[in-house]
Image (cartoon, grey):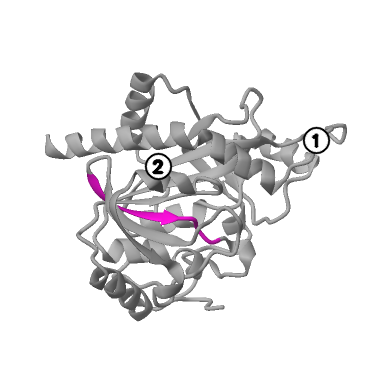
Amino acid sequence: MAEYITRQMVVEAAEYIRKRGCSCPHVGLILGSGLNAVAERVLDAKIIPYREIPHFPNSTVPGHAGRLLLGCFGGLETLVMQGRVHYYEGYSLAEVTLPVRVMQLLGLDTLIVTNAAGGIRPGLRVGDLMAITDHINFVGMAGHHPLRGPNDEHFGPRFLDMTRAYDPGLLELLRAEAKEQGVPLQEGVYAMLAGPSFETPAEVRFLRAIGADAVGMSTVPEVIVARHGGLRVLGISLISNVAHDSLAAGEKASHEEVLEAGRRAEPILAGLLEGFLRRLSRARME
């Protein structure tokens, strides 16, 4: 496990991707658990397995295909991560976020992150899509932060402002597209815990009390590194299960439940993302 990554490692990964036919993508898209099929809408896709890219971490979790796709999605050249890696898999946060550093060197200016999350706020239901408006970084608060260690000023500043981690302009475009498509869009705060265990009822009650609306095991490190590199960020959570706040809850949370929720929501999320990217493409030309 590499505690830190070097600029040379990022350069080597980016150069490999360029040589495989990367044609100046504008947008990066990270697909969460069970959302692999969204990538089927990418046109003329060049596919690179993660294991072939120098220094790239390879996913070990079911529901994460571990492939990079380069192609056109919603009218924009897009780099799609078909699955991600997680801190709980044994990777350092530097390794988890290396793909985002690579996106930065490839010249991307926008990152869309998706995930499967447990619903904490009352009223959130399995299958809901929630635009992330802010996050709570429990892993980082405990000292495990993706910017820990030597700072390379070529990537970004030593001290990073996170006041607007999720871009308000991108969120407005998503709201408009969801309204046009008739897709109910929730909004809320995403809390990241390390995993891989699901939350206890006491932890769920605590998270709700401090303002979290949904909880998961990813996304936040990628968002931090994207913002460190100057990328605009849009985040979307699929509510894949309801986090239980009582010992009397009859059902148990499971990864199978998460994957099944992803399969059901994929067509809706894919259509929403495609429409969003078309709006983004038009906005760039105005």
Q: Nearer the viewer, residue 227 or 91?
A: 91
Q: What secondary structure is found at the residue carrying circle 1? A: loop
User: Around disc 1, counting alpha carbons within 10 Å, would you say few (fewer than 14), some (14 to 19), or many (20 or more)?
Assistant: few
Q: Amino acid at mark 1?
A: Glu
The residue lying at 61 percent from left, 56 percent from top is: 62
Give the magenta-colored segment's residue range.
76-85
- Quadrant assignment for the N terminus: bottom right
- How many numbered callouts? 2
Label 1, on which residue? 251
- Where is residue 274, by image quadrant? top left
The answer to whether any part of residue 45 appears in the image is: yes
Residue that mark 2 sits on: 166
Given residues 231 and 47, the one toward you in this image is 47
SS for dot 2: loop
Q: Position of residue 199 (x, y in %)?
A: 73, 46
Q: Amino acid at mark 2?
A: Tyr
**Relative to residue 95, is residue 41 depicted above or below?**
above
The residue at the point 60 percent across, 34 percent down is 213
Main SS, magenta region, reads strand
**Neighbour tally class for label 2: few under 14, some 14-19, many 20 plus, Cα within 10 Å:** many
Look at the picture and state if 183 lies above or below 3.
above
Q: Residue 159: image x %, image y %?
A: 40, 61
**Residue at horizontal 76%, vertical 35%?**
244
